[in-house]
Amino acid sequence: PSLGSFSVSAAILTALLEEYSSELGEKSAKFDTDPHFWMPLTLSEQDYVTLMSQKGIEEAESLAHYNRMKAFNEKFDRGGMGLFGAVDVGKDACWWDYGQLKLYSKNSLLLLEDSNPESTLLRKFLSIEHGPVTAEGTLSMNHSYAFASKLEKGSLKNSLV
């Protein structure tokens, strides 16, 4: 299964935050990347409306969103670049794909592979200042990490929580 990850430039992220500032501020709407970002920017109006009707969305709502994204696309300053495209990061770059569940797990567990040089790079990228923790007490941690968790007792070994 796909977790739907992709990268955007700071410029388009800023423009999208501005475009949807009222919805974000009011927390009044829910948008998903496929039907609300990719599809209206890449499909024809008729194909978009037809597809959204199959998802139970009324034609008027689909047209309004399609036209909003069309206007967004027309006013967005690309700085001479295309709206979508591949980026060559070089043959020696690290690539930690989090777009699929199996790769999310594999790449997260890389934090525990002390002998792998990518582990150090991933820790630096994630602003983790130390290697896996080993500690004793009511909570025993052996070569593990616990993030945003409240653990009181038990034991962890070679784990990410």
Image (cartoon, rainbow, N blue to C red):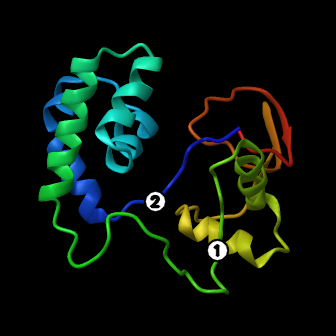
- Quadrant assignment, res 32: top left
Q: Residue at x 15, y 56 (%)?
A: 74
Q: Position of residue 48 (x, y in %)?
A: 37, 34
Vertical arrangement, residue 116 with respect to residue 126, above or below: below
Quadrant occupied by the N terminus: top right
Q: Label 2 belongs to which residue?
A: 7
> What is the three-letter code of the residue carrying label 2?
Ser
Front in this rendered view, residue 156 or 90: 90
Residue at the image point whose x is 18% and y is 28% from the top: 64
Q: Is residue 104 above or below residue 76?
A: above
**Quick check: 125 left or right of 65?**
right
In the image, taking residue 112 as reference, residue 68 lies left or right, namely left
Q: Which mark is residue 121?
A: 1
Check whether the beta carbons of the residues at disc 2 and disc 1 lie within 8 A of each other: no
Q: Would residue 84 appear left or right of 158 to someone viewing this image?
A: left
Q: Quadrant of residue 56?
A: top left
Label 1 is placed on what type of residue?
Leu
